[in-house]
Amino acid sequence: MIPLRILIVDDEPLGRRAVRQLLLAHNDCEVVAEARNGREAIRLIDNLKPDLVFLDIQMPEIDGFAVLRALAPAHLPWVIFITAYDTFAVRAFESNALDYLVKPLHETRFKDALARVRERCRSKEAIELSKRLSALLANEPPIPETQIEPVRRILVGTGEGAVILDLSEIDWMSAEDYYVAIHSQGHKYLVRESLSSLESRLDHSQFLRVHRKVIVNFAQIQKTIAHSEDGSFLLLRTGDKLPVSRRHRSRVADALRRLKT
């Protein structure tokens, strides 16, 4: 069997790694390249002509839709969209015989998506589907940031099932390997998603990134401990002491000043 030549496109290294790891279980898949942004994706698709592209929808400057609009219709590969939001025209893409995966990626759903691609690659419908995709993309505007509404609740898994957390119940979040640890009322829940991806879905008037590995709920900040021997910290009402990196120090100070006005 001729392997599927695959390009992975995601601006987050963690997102690209997650796709690559899931592909390890599929011997008929060959990753020919990875792209960190839309511009790289366009160049690599033109040069390498992959069979399949795992394409993140929301990327800075050139989003996933713009990547496909920039390609000649004859060179359009099969596409599995990857998105953190289940609202970006996914139904339209599904009706046009494309597929999409919602972050965090799940092995069963990933396997099903690849099975559909394999079936379509064997089908004579490939040319017609390429034309329909081109027509769809011609009328699809780029995704403005204002379309993304912050989530109000987060679903987390536990050993006993699932728990729905209101954002007000979340004290702080931290990056732990391939997961985000959500700290809430003395409990810790793990979500398989990158911290940056989760941050993009939060209300920025309620949550603030204070460190590359830490996001804090404003309401839980009790006081700041600035310029101690170990650096700057936030002391939360829960008693947790969280680091504030130099990169984020001025942003944190500005945000706290705005809260006082």
Image (cartoon, rainbow, N blue to C red):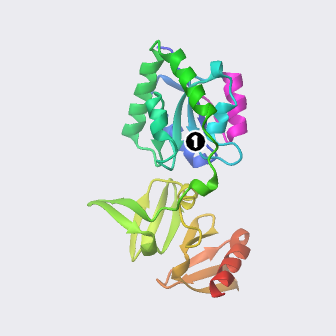
**Res 207 visible:** yes
Q: Residue at x 59, y 68 (%)?
A: 204
The residue nearer to you, when weighing 226 against 41, is 41
**Drawn side of residue 198 relative to residue 76, left or right:** left
Q: Position of residue 166 (x, y in %)?
A: 41, 69
Write down the quadrant of residue 207 in the picture. bottom right
Q: Residue at x 70, y 80 (%)?
A: 253
Segment tinted magenta in the rendering: 32-48
**Drawn side of residue 69 relative to residue 220, left or right:** right
Q: Position of residue 115 (x, y in %)?
A: 40, 26
Q: Residue furthest front?
A: 139
Q: Position of residue 91 (x, y in %)?
A: 45, 38
The residue nearer to you, when weighing 137 against 194, is 137
**Res 6 visible:** no
Asked if residue 41 is among those painted magenta in the image, a careful observer would answer: yes
Q: Residue at x 58, y 42 (%)?
A: 57
Using the image, determine if residue 10 lies above or below residue 197: above
**Drawn side of residue 26 relative to residue 215, left or right:** left
**What type is the residue that disc 1 sits on?**
Asp
Using the image, determine if residue 133 lies above or below residue 38: above
Q: Which quadrant is the C terminus positioned in? A: bottom right
Using the image, determine if residue 54 lies above or below residue 169: above
Helix, strand or loop for disc 1: strand
Q: Position of residue 13 (x, y in %)?
A: 61, 47
What main secondary structure does the magenta stretch of the protein show?
Answer: helix
Badge 1 local density, few (<14 within 10 Å), some, or many (20+)? Answer: many
Residue wearing tag 1: 56
**Drawn side of residue 162 relative to residue 31, left or right:** left
Q: Residue at x 56, y 84 (%)?
A: 235
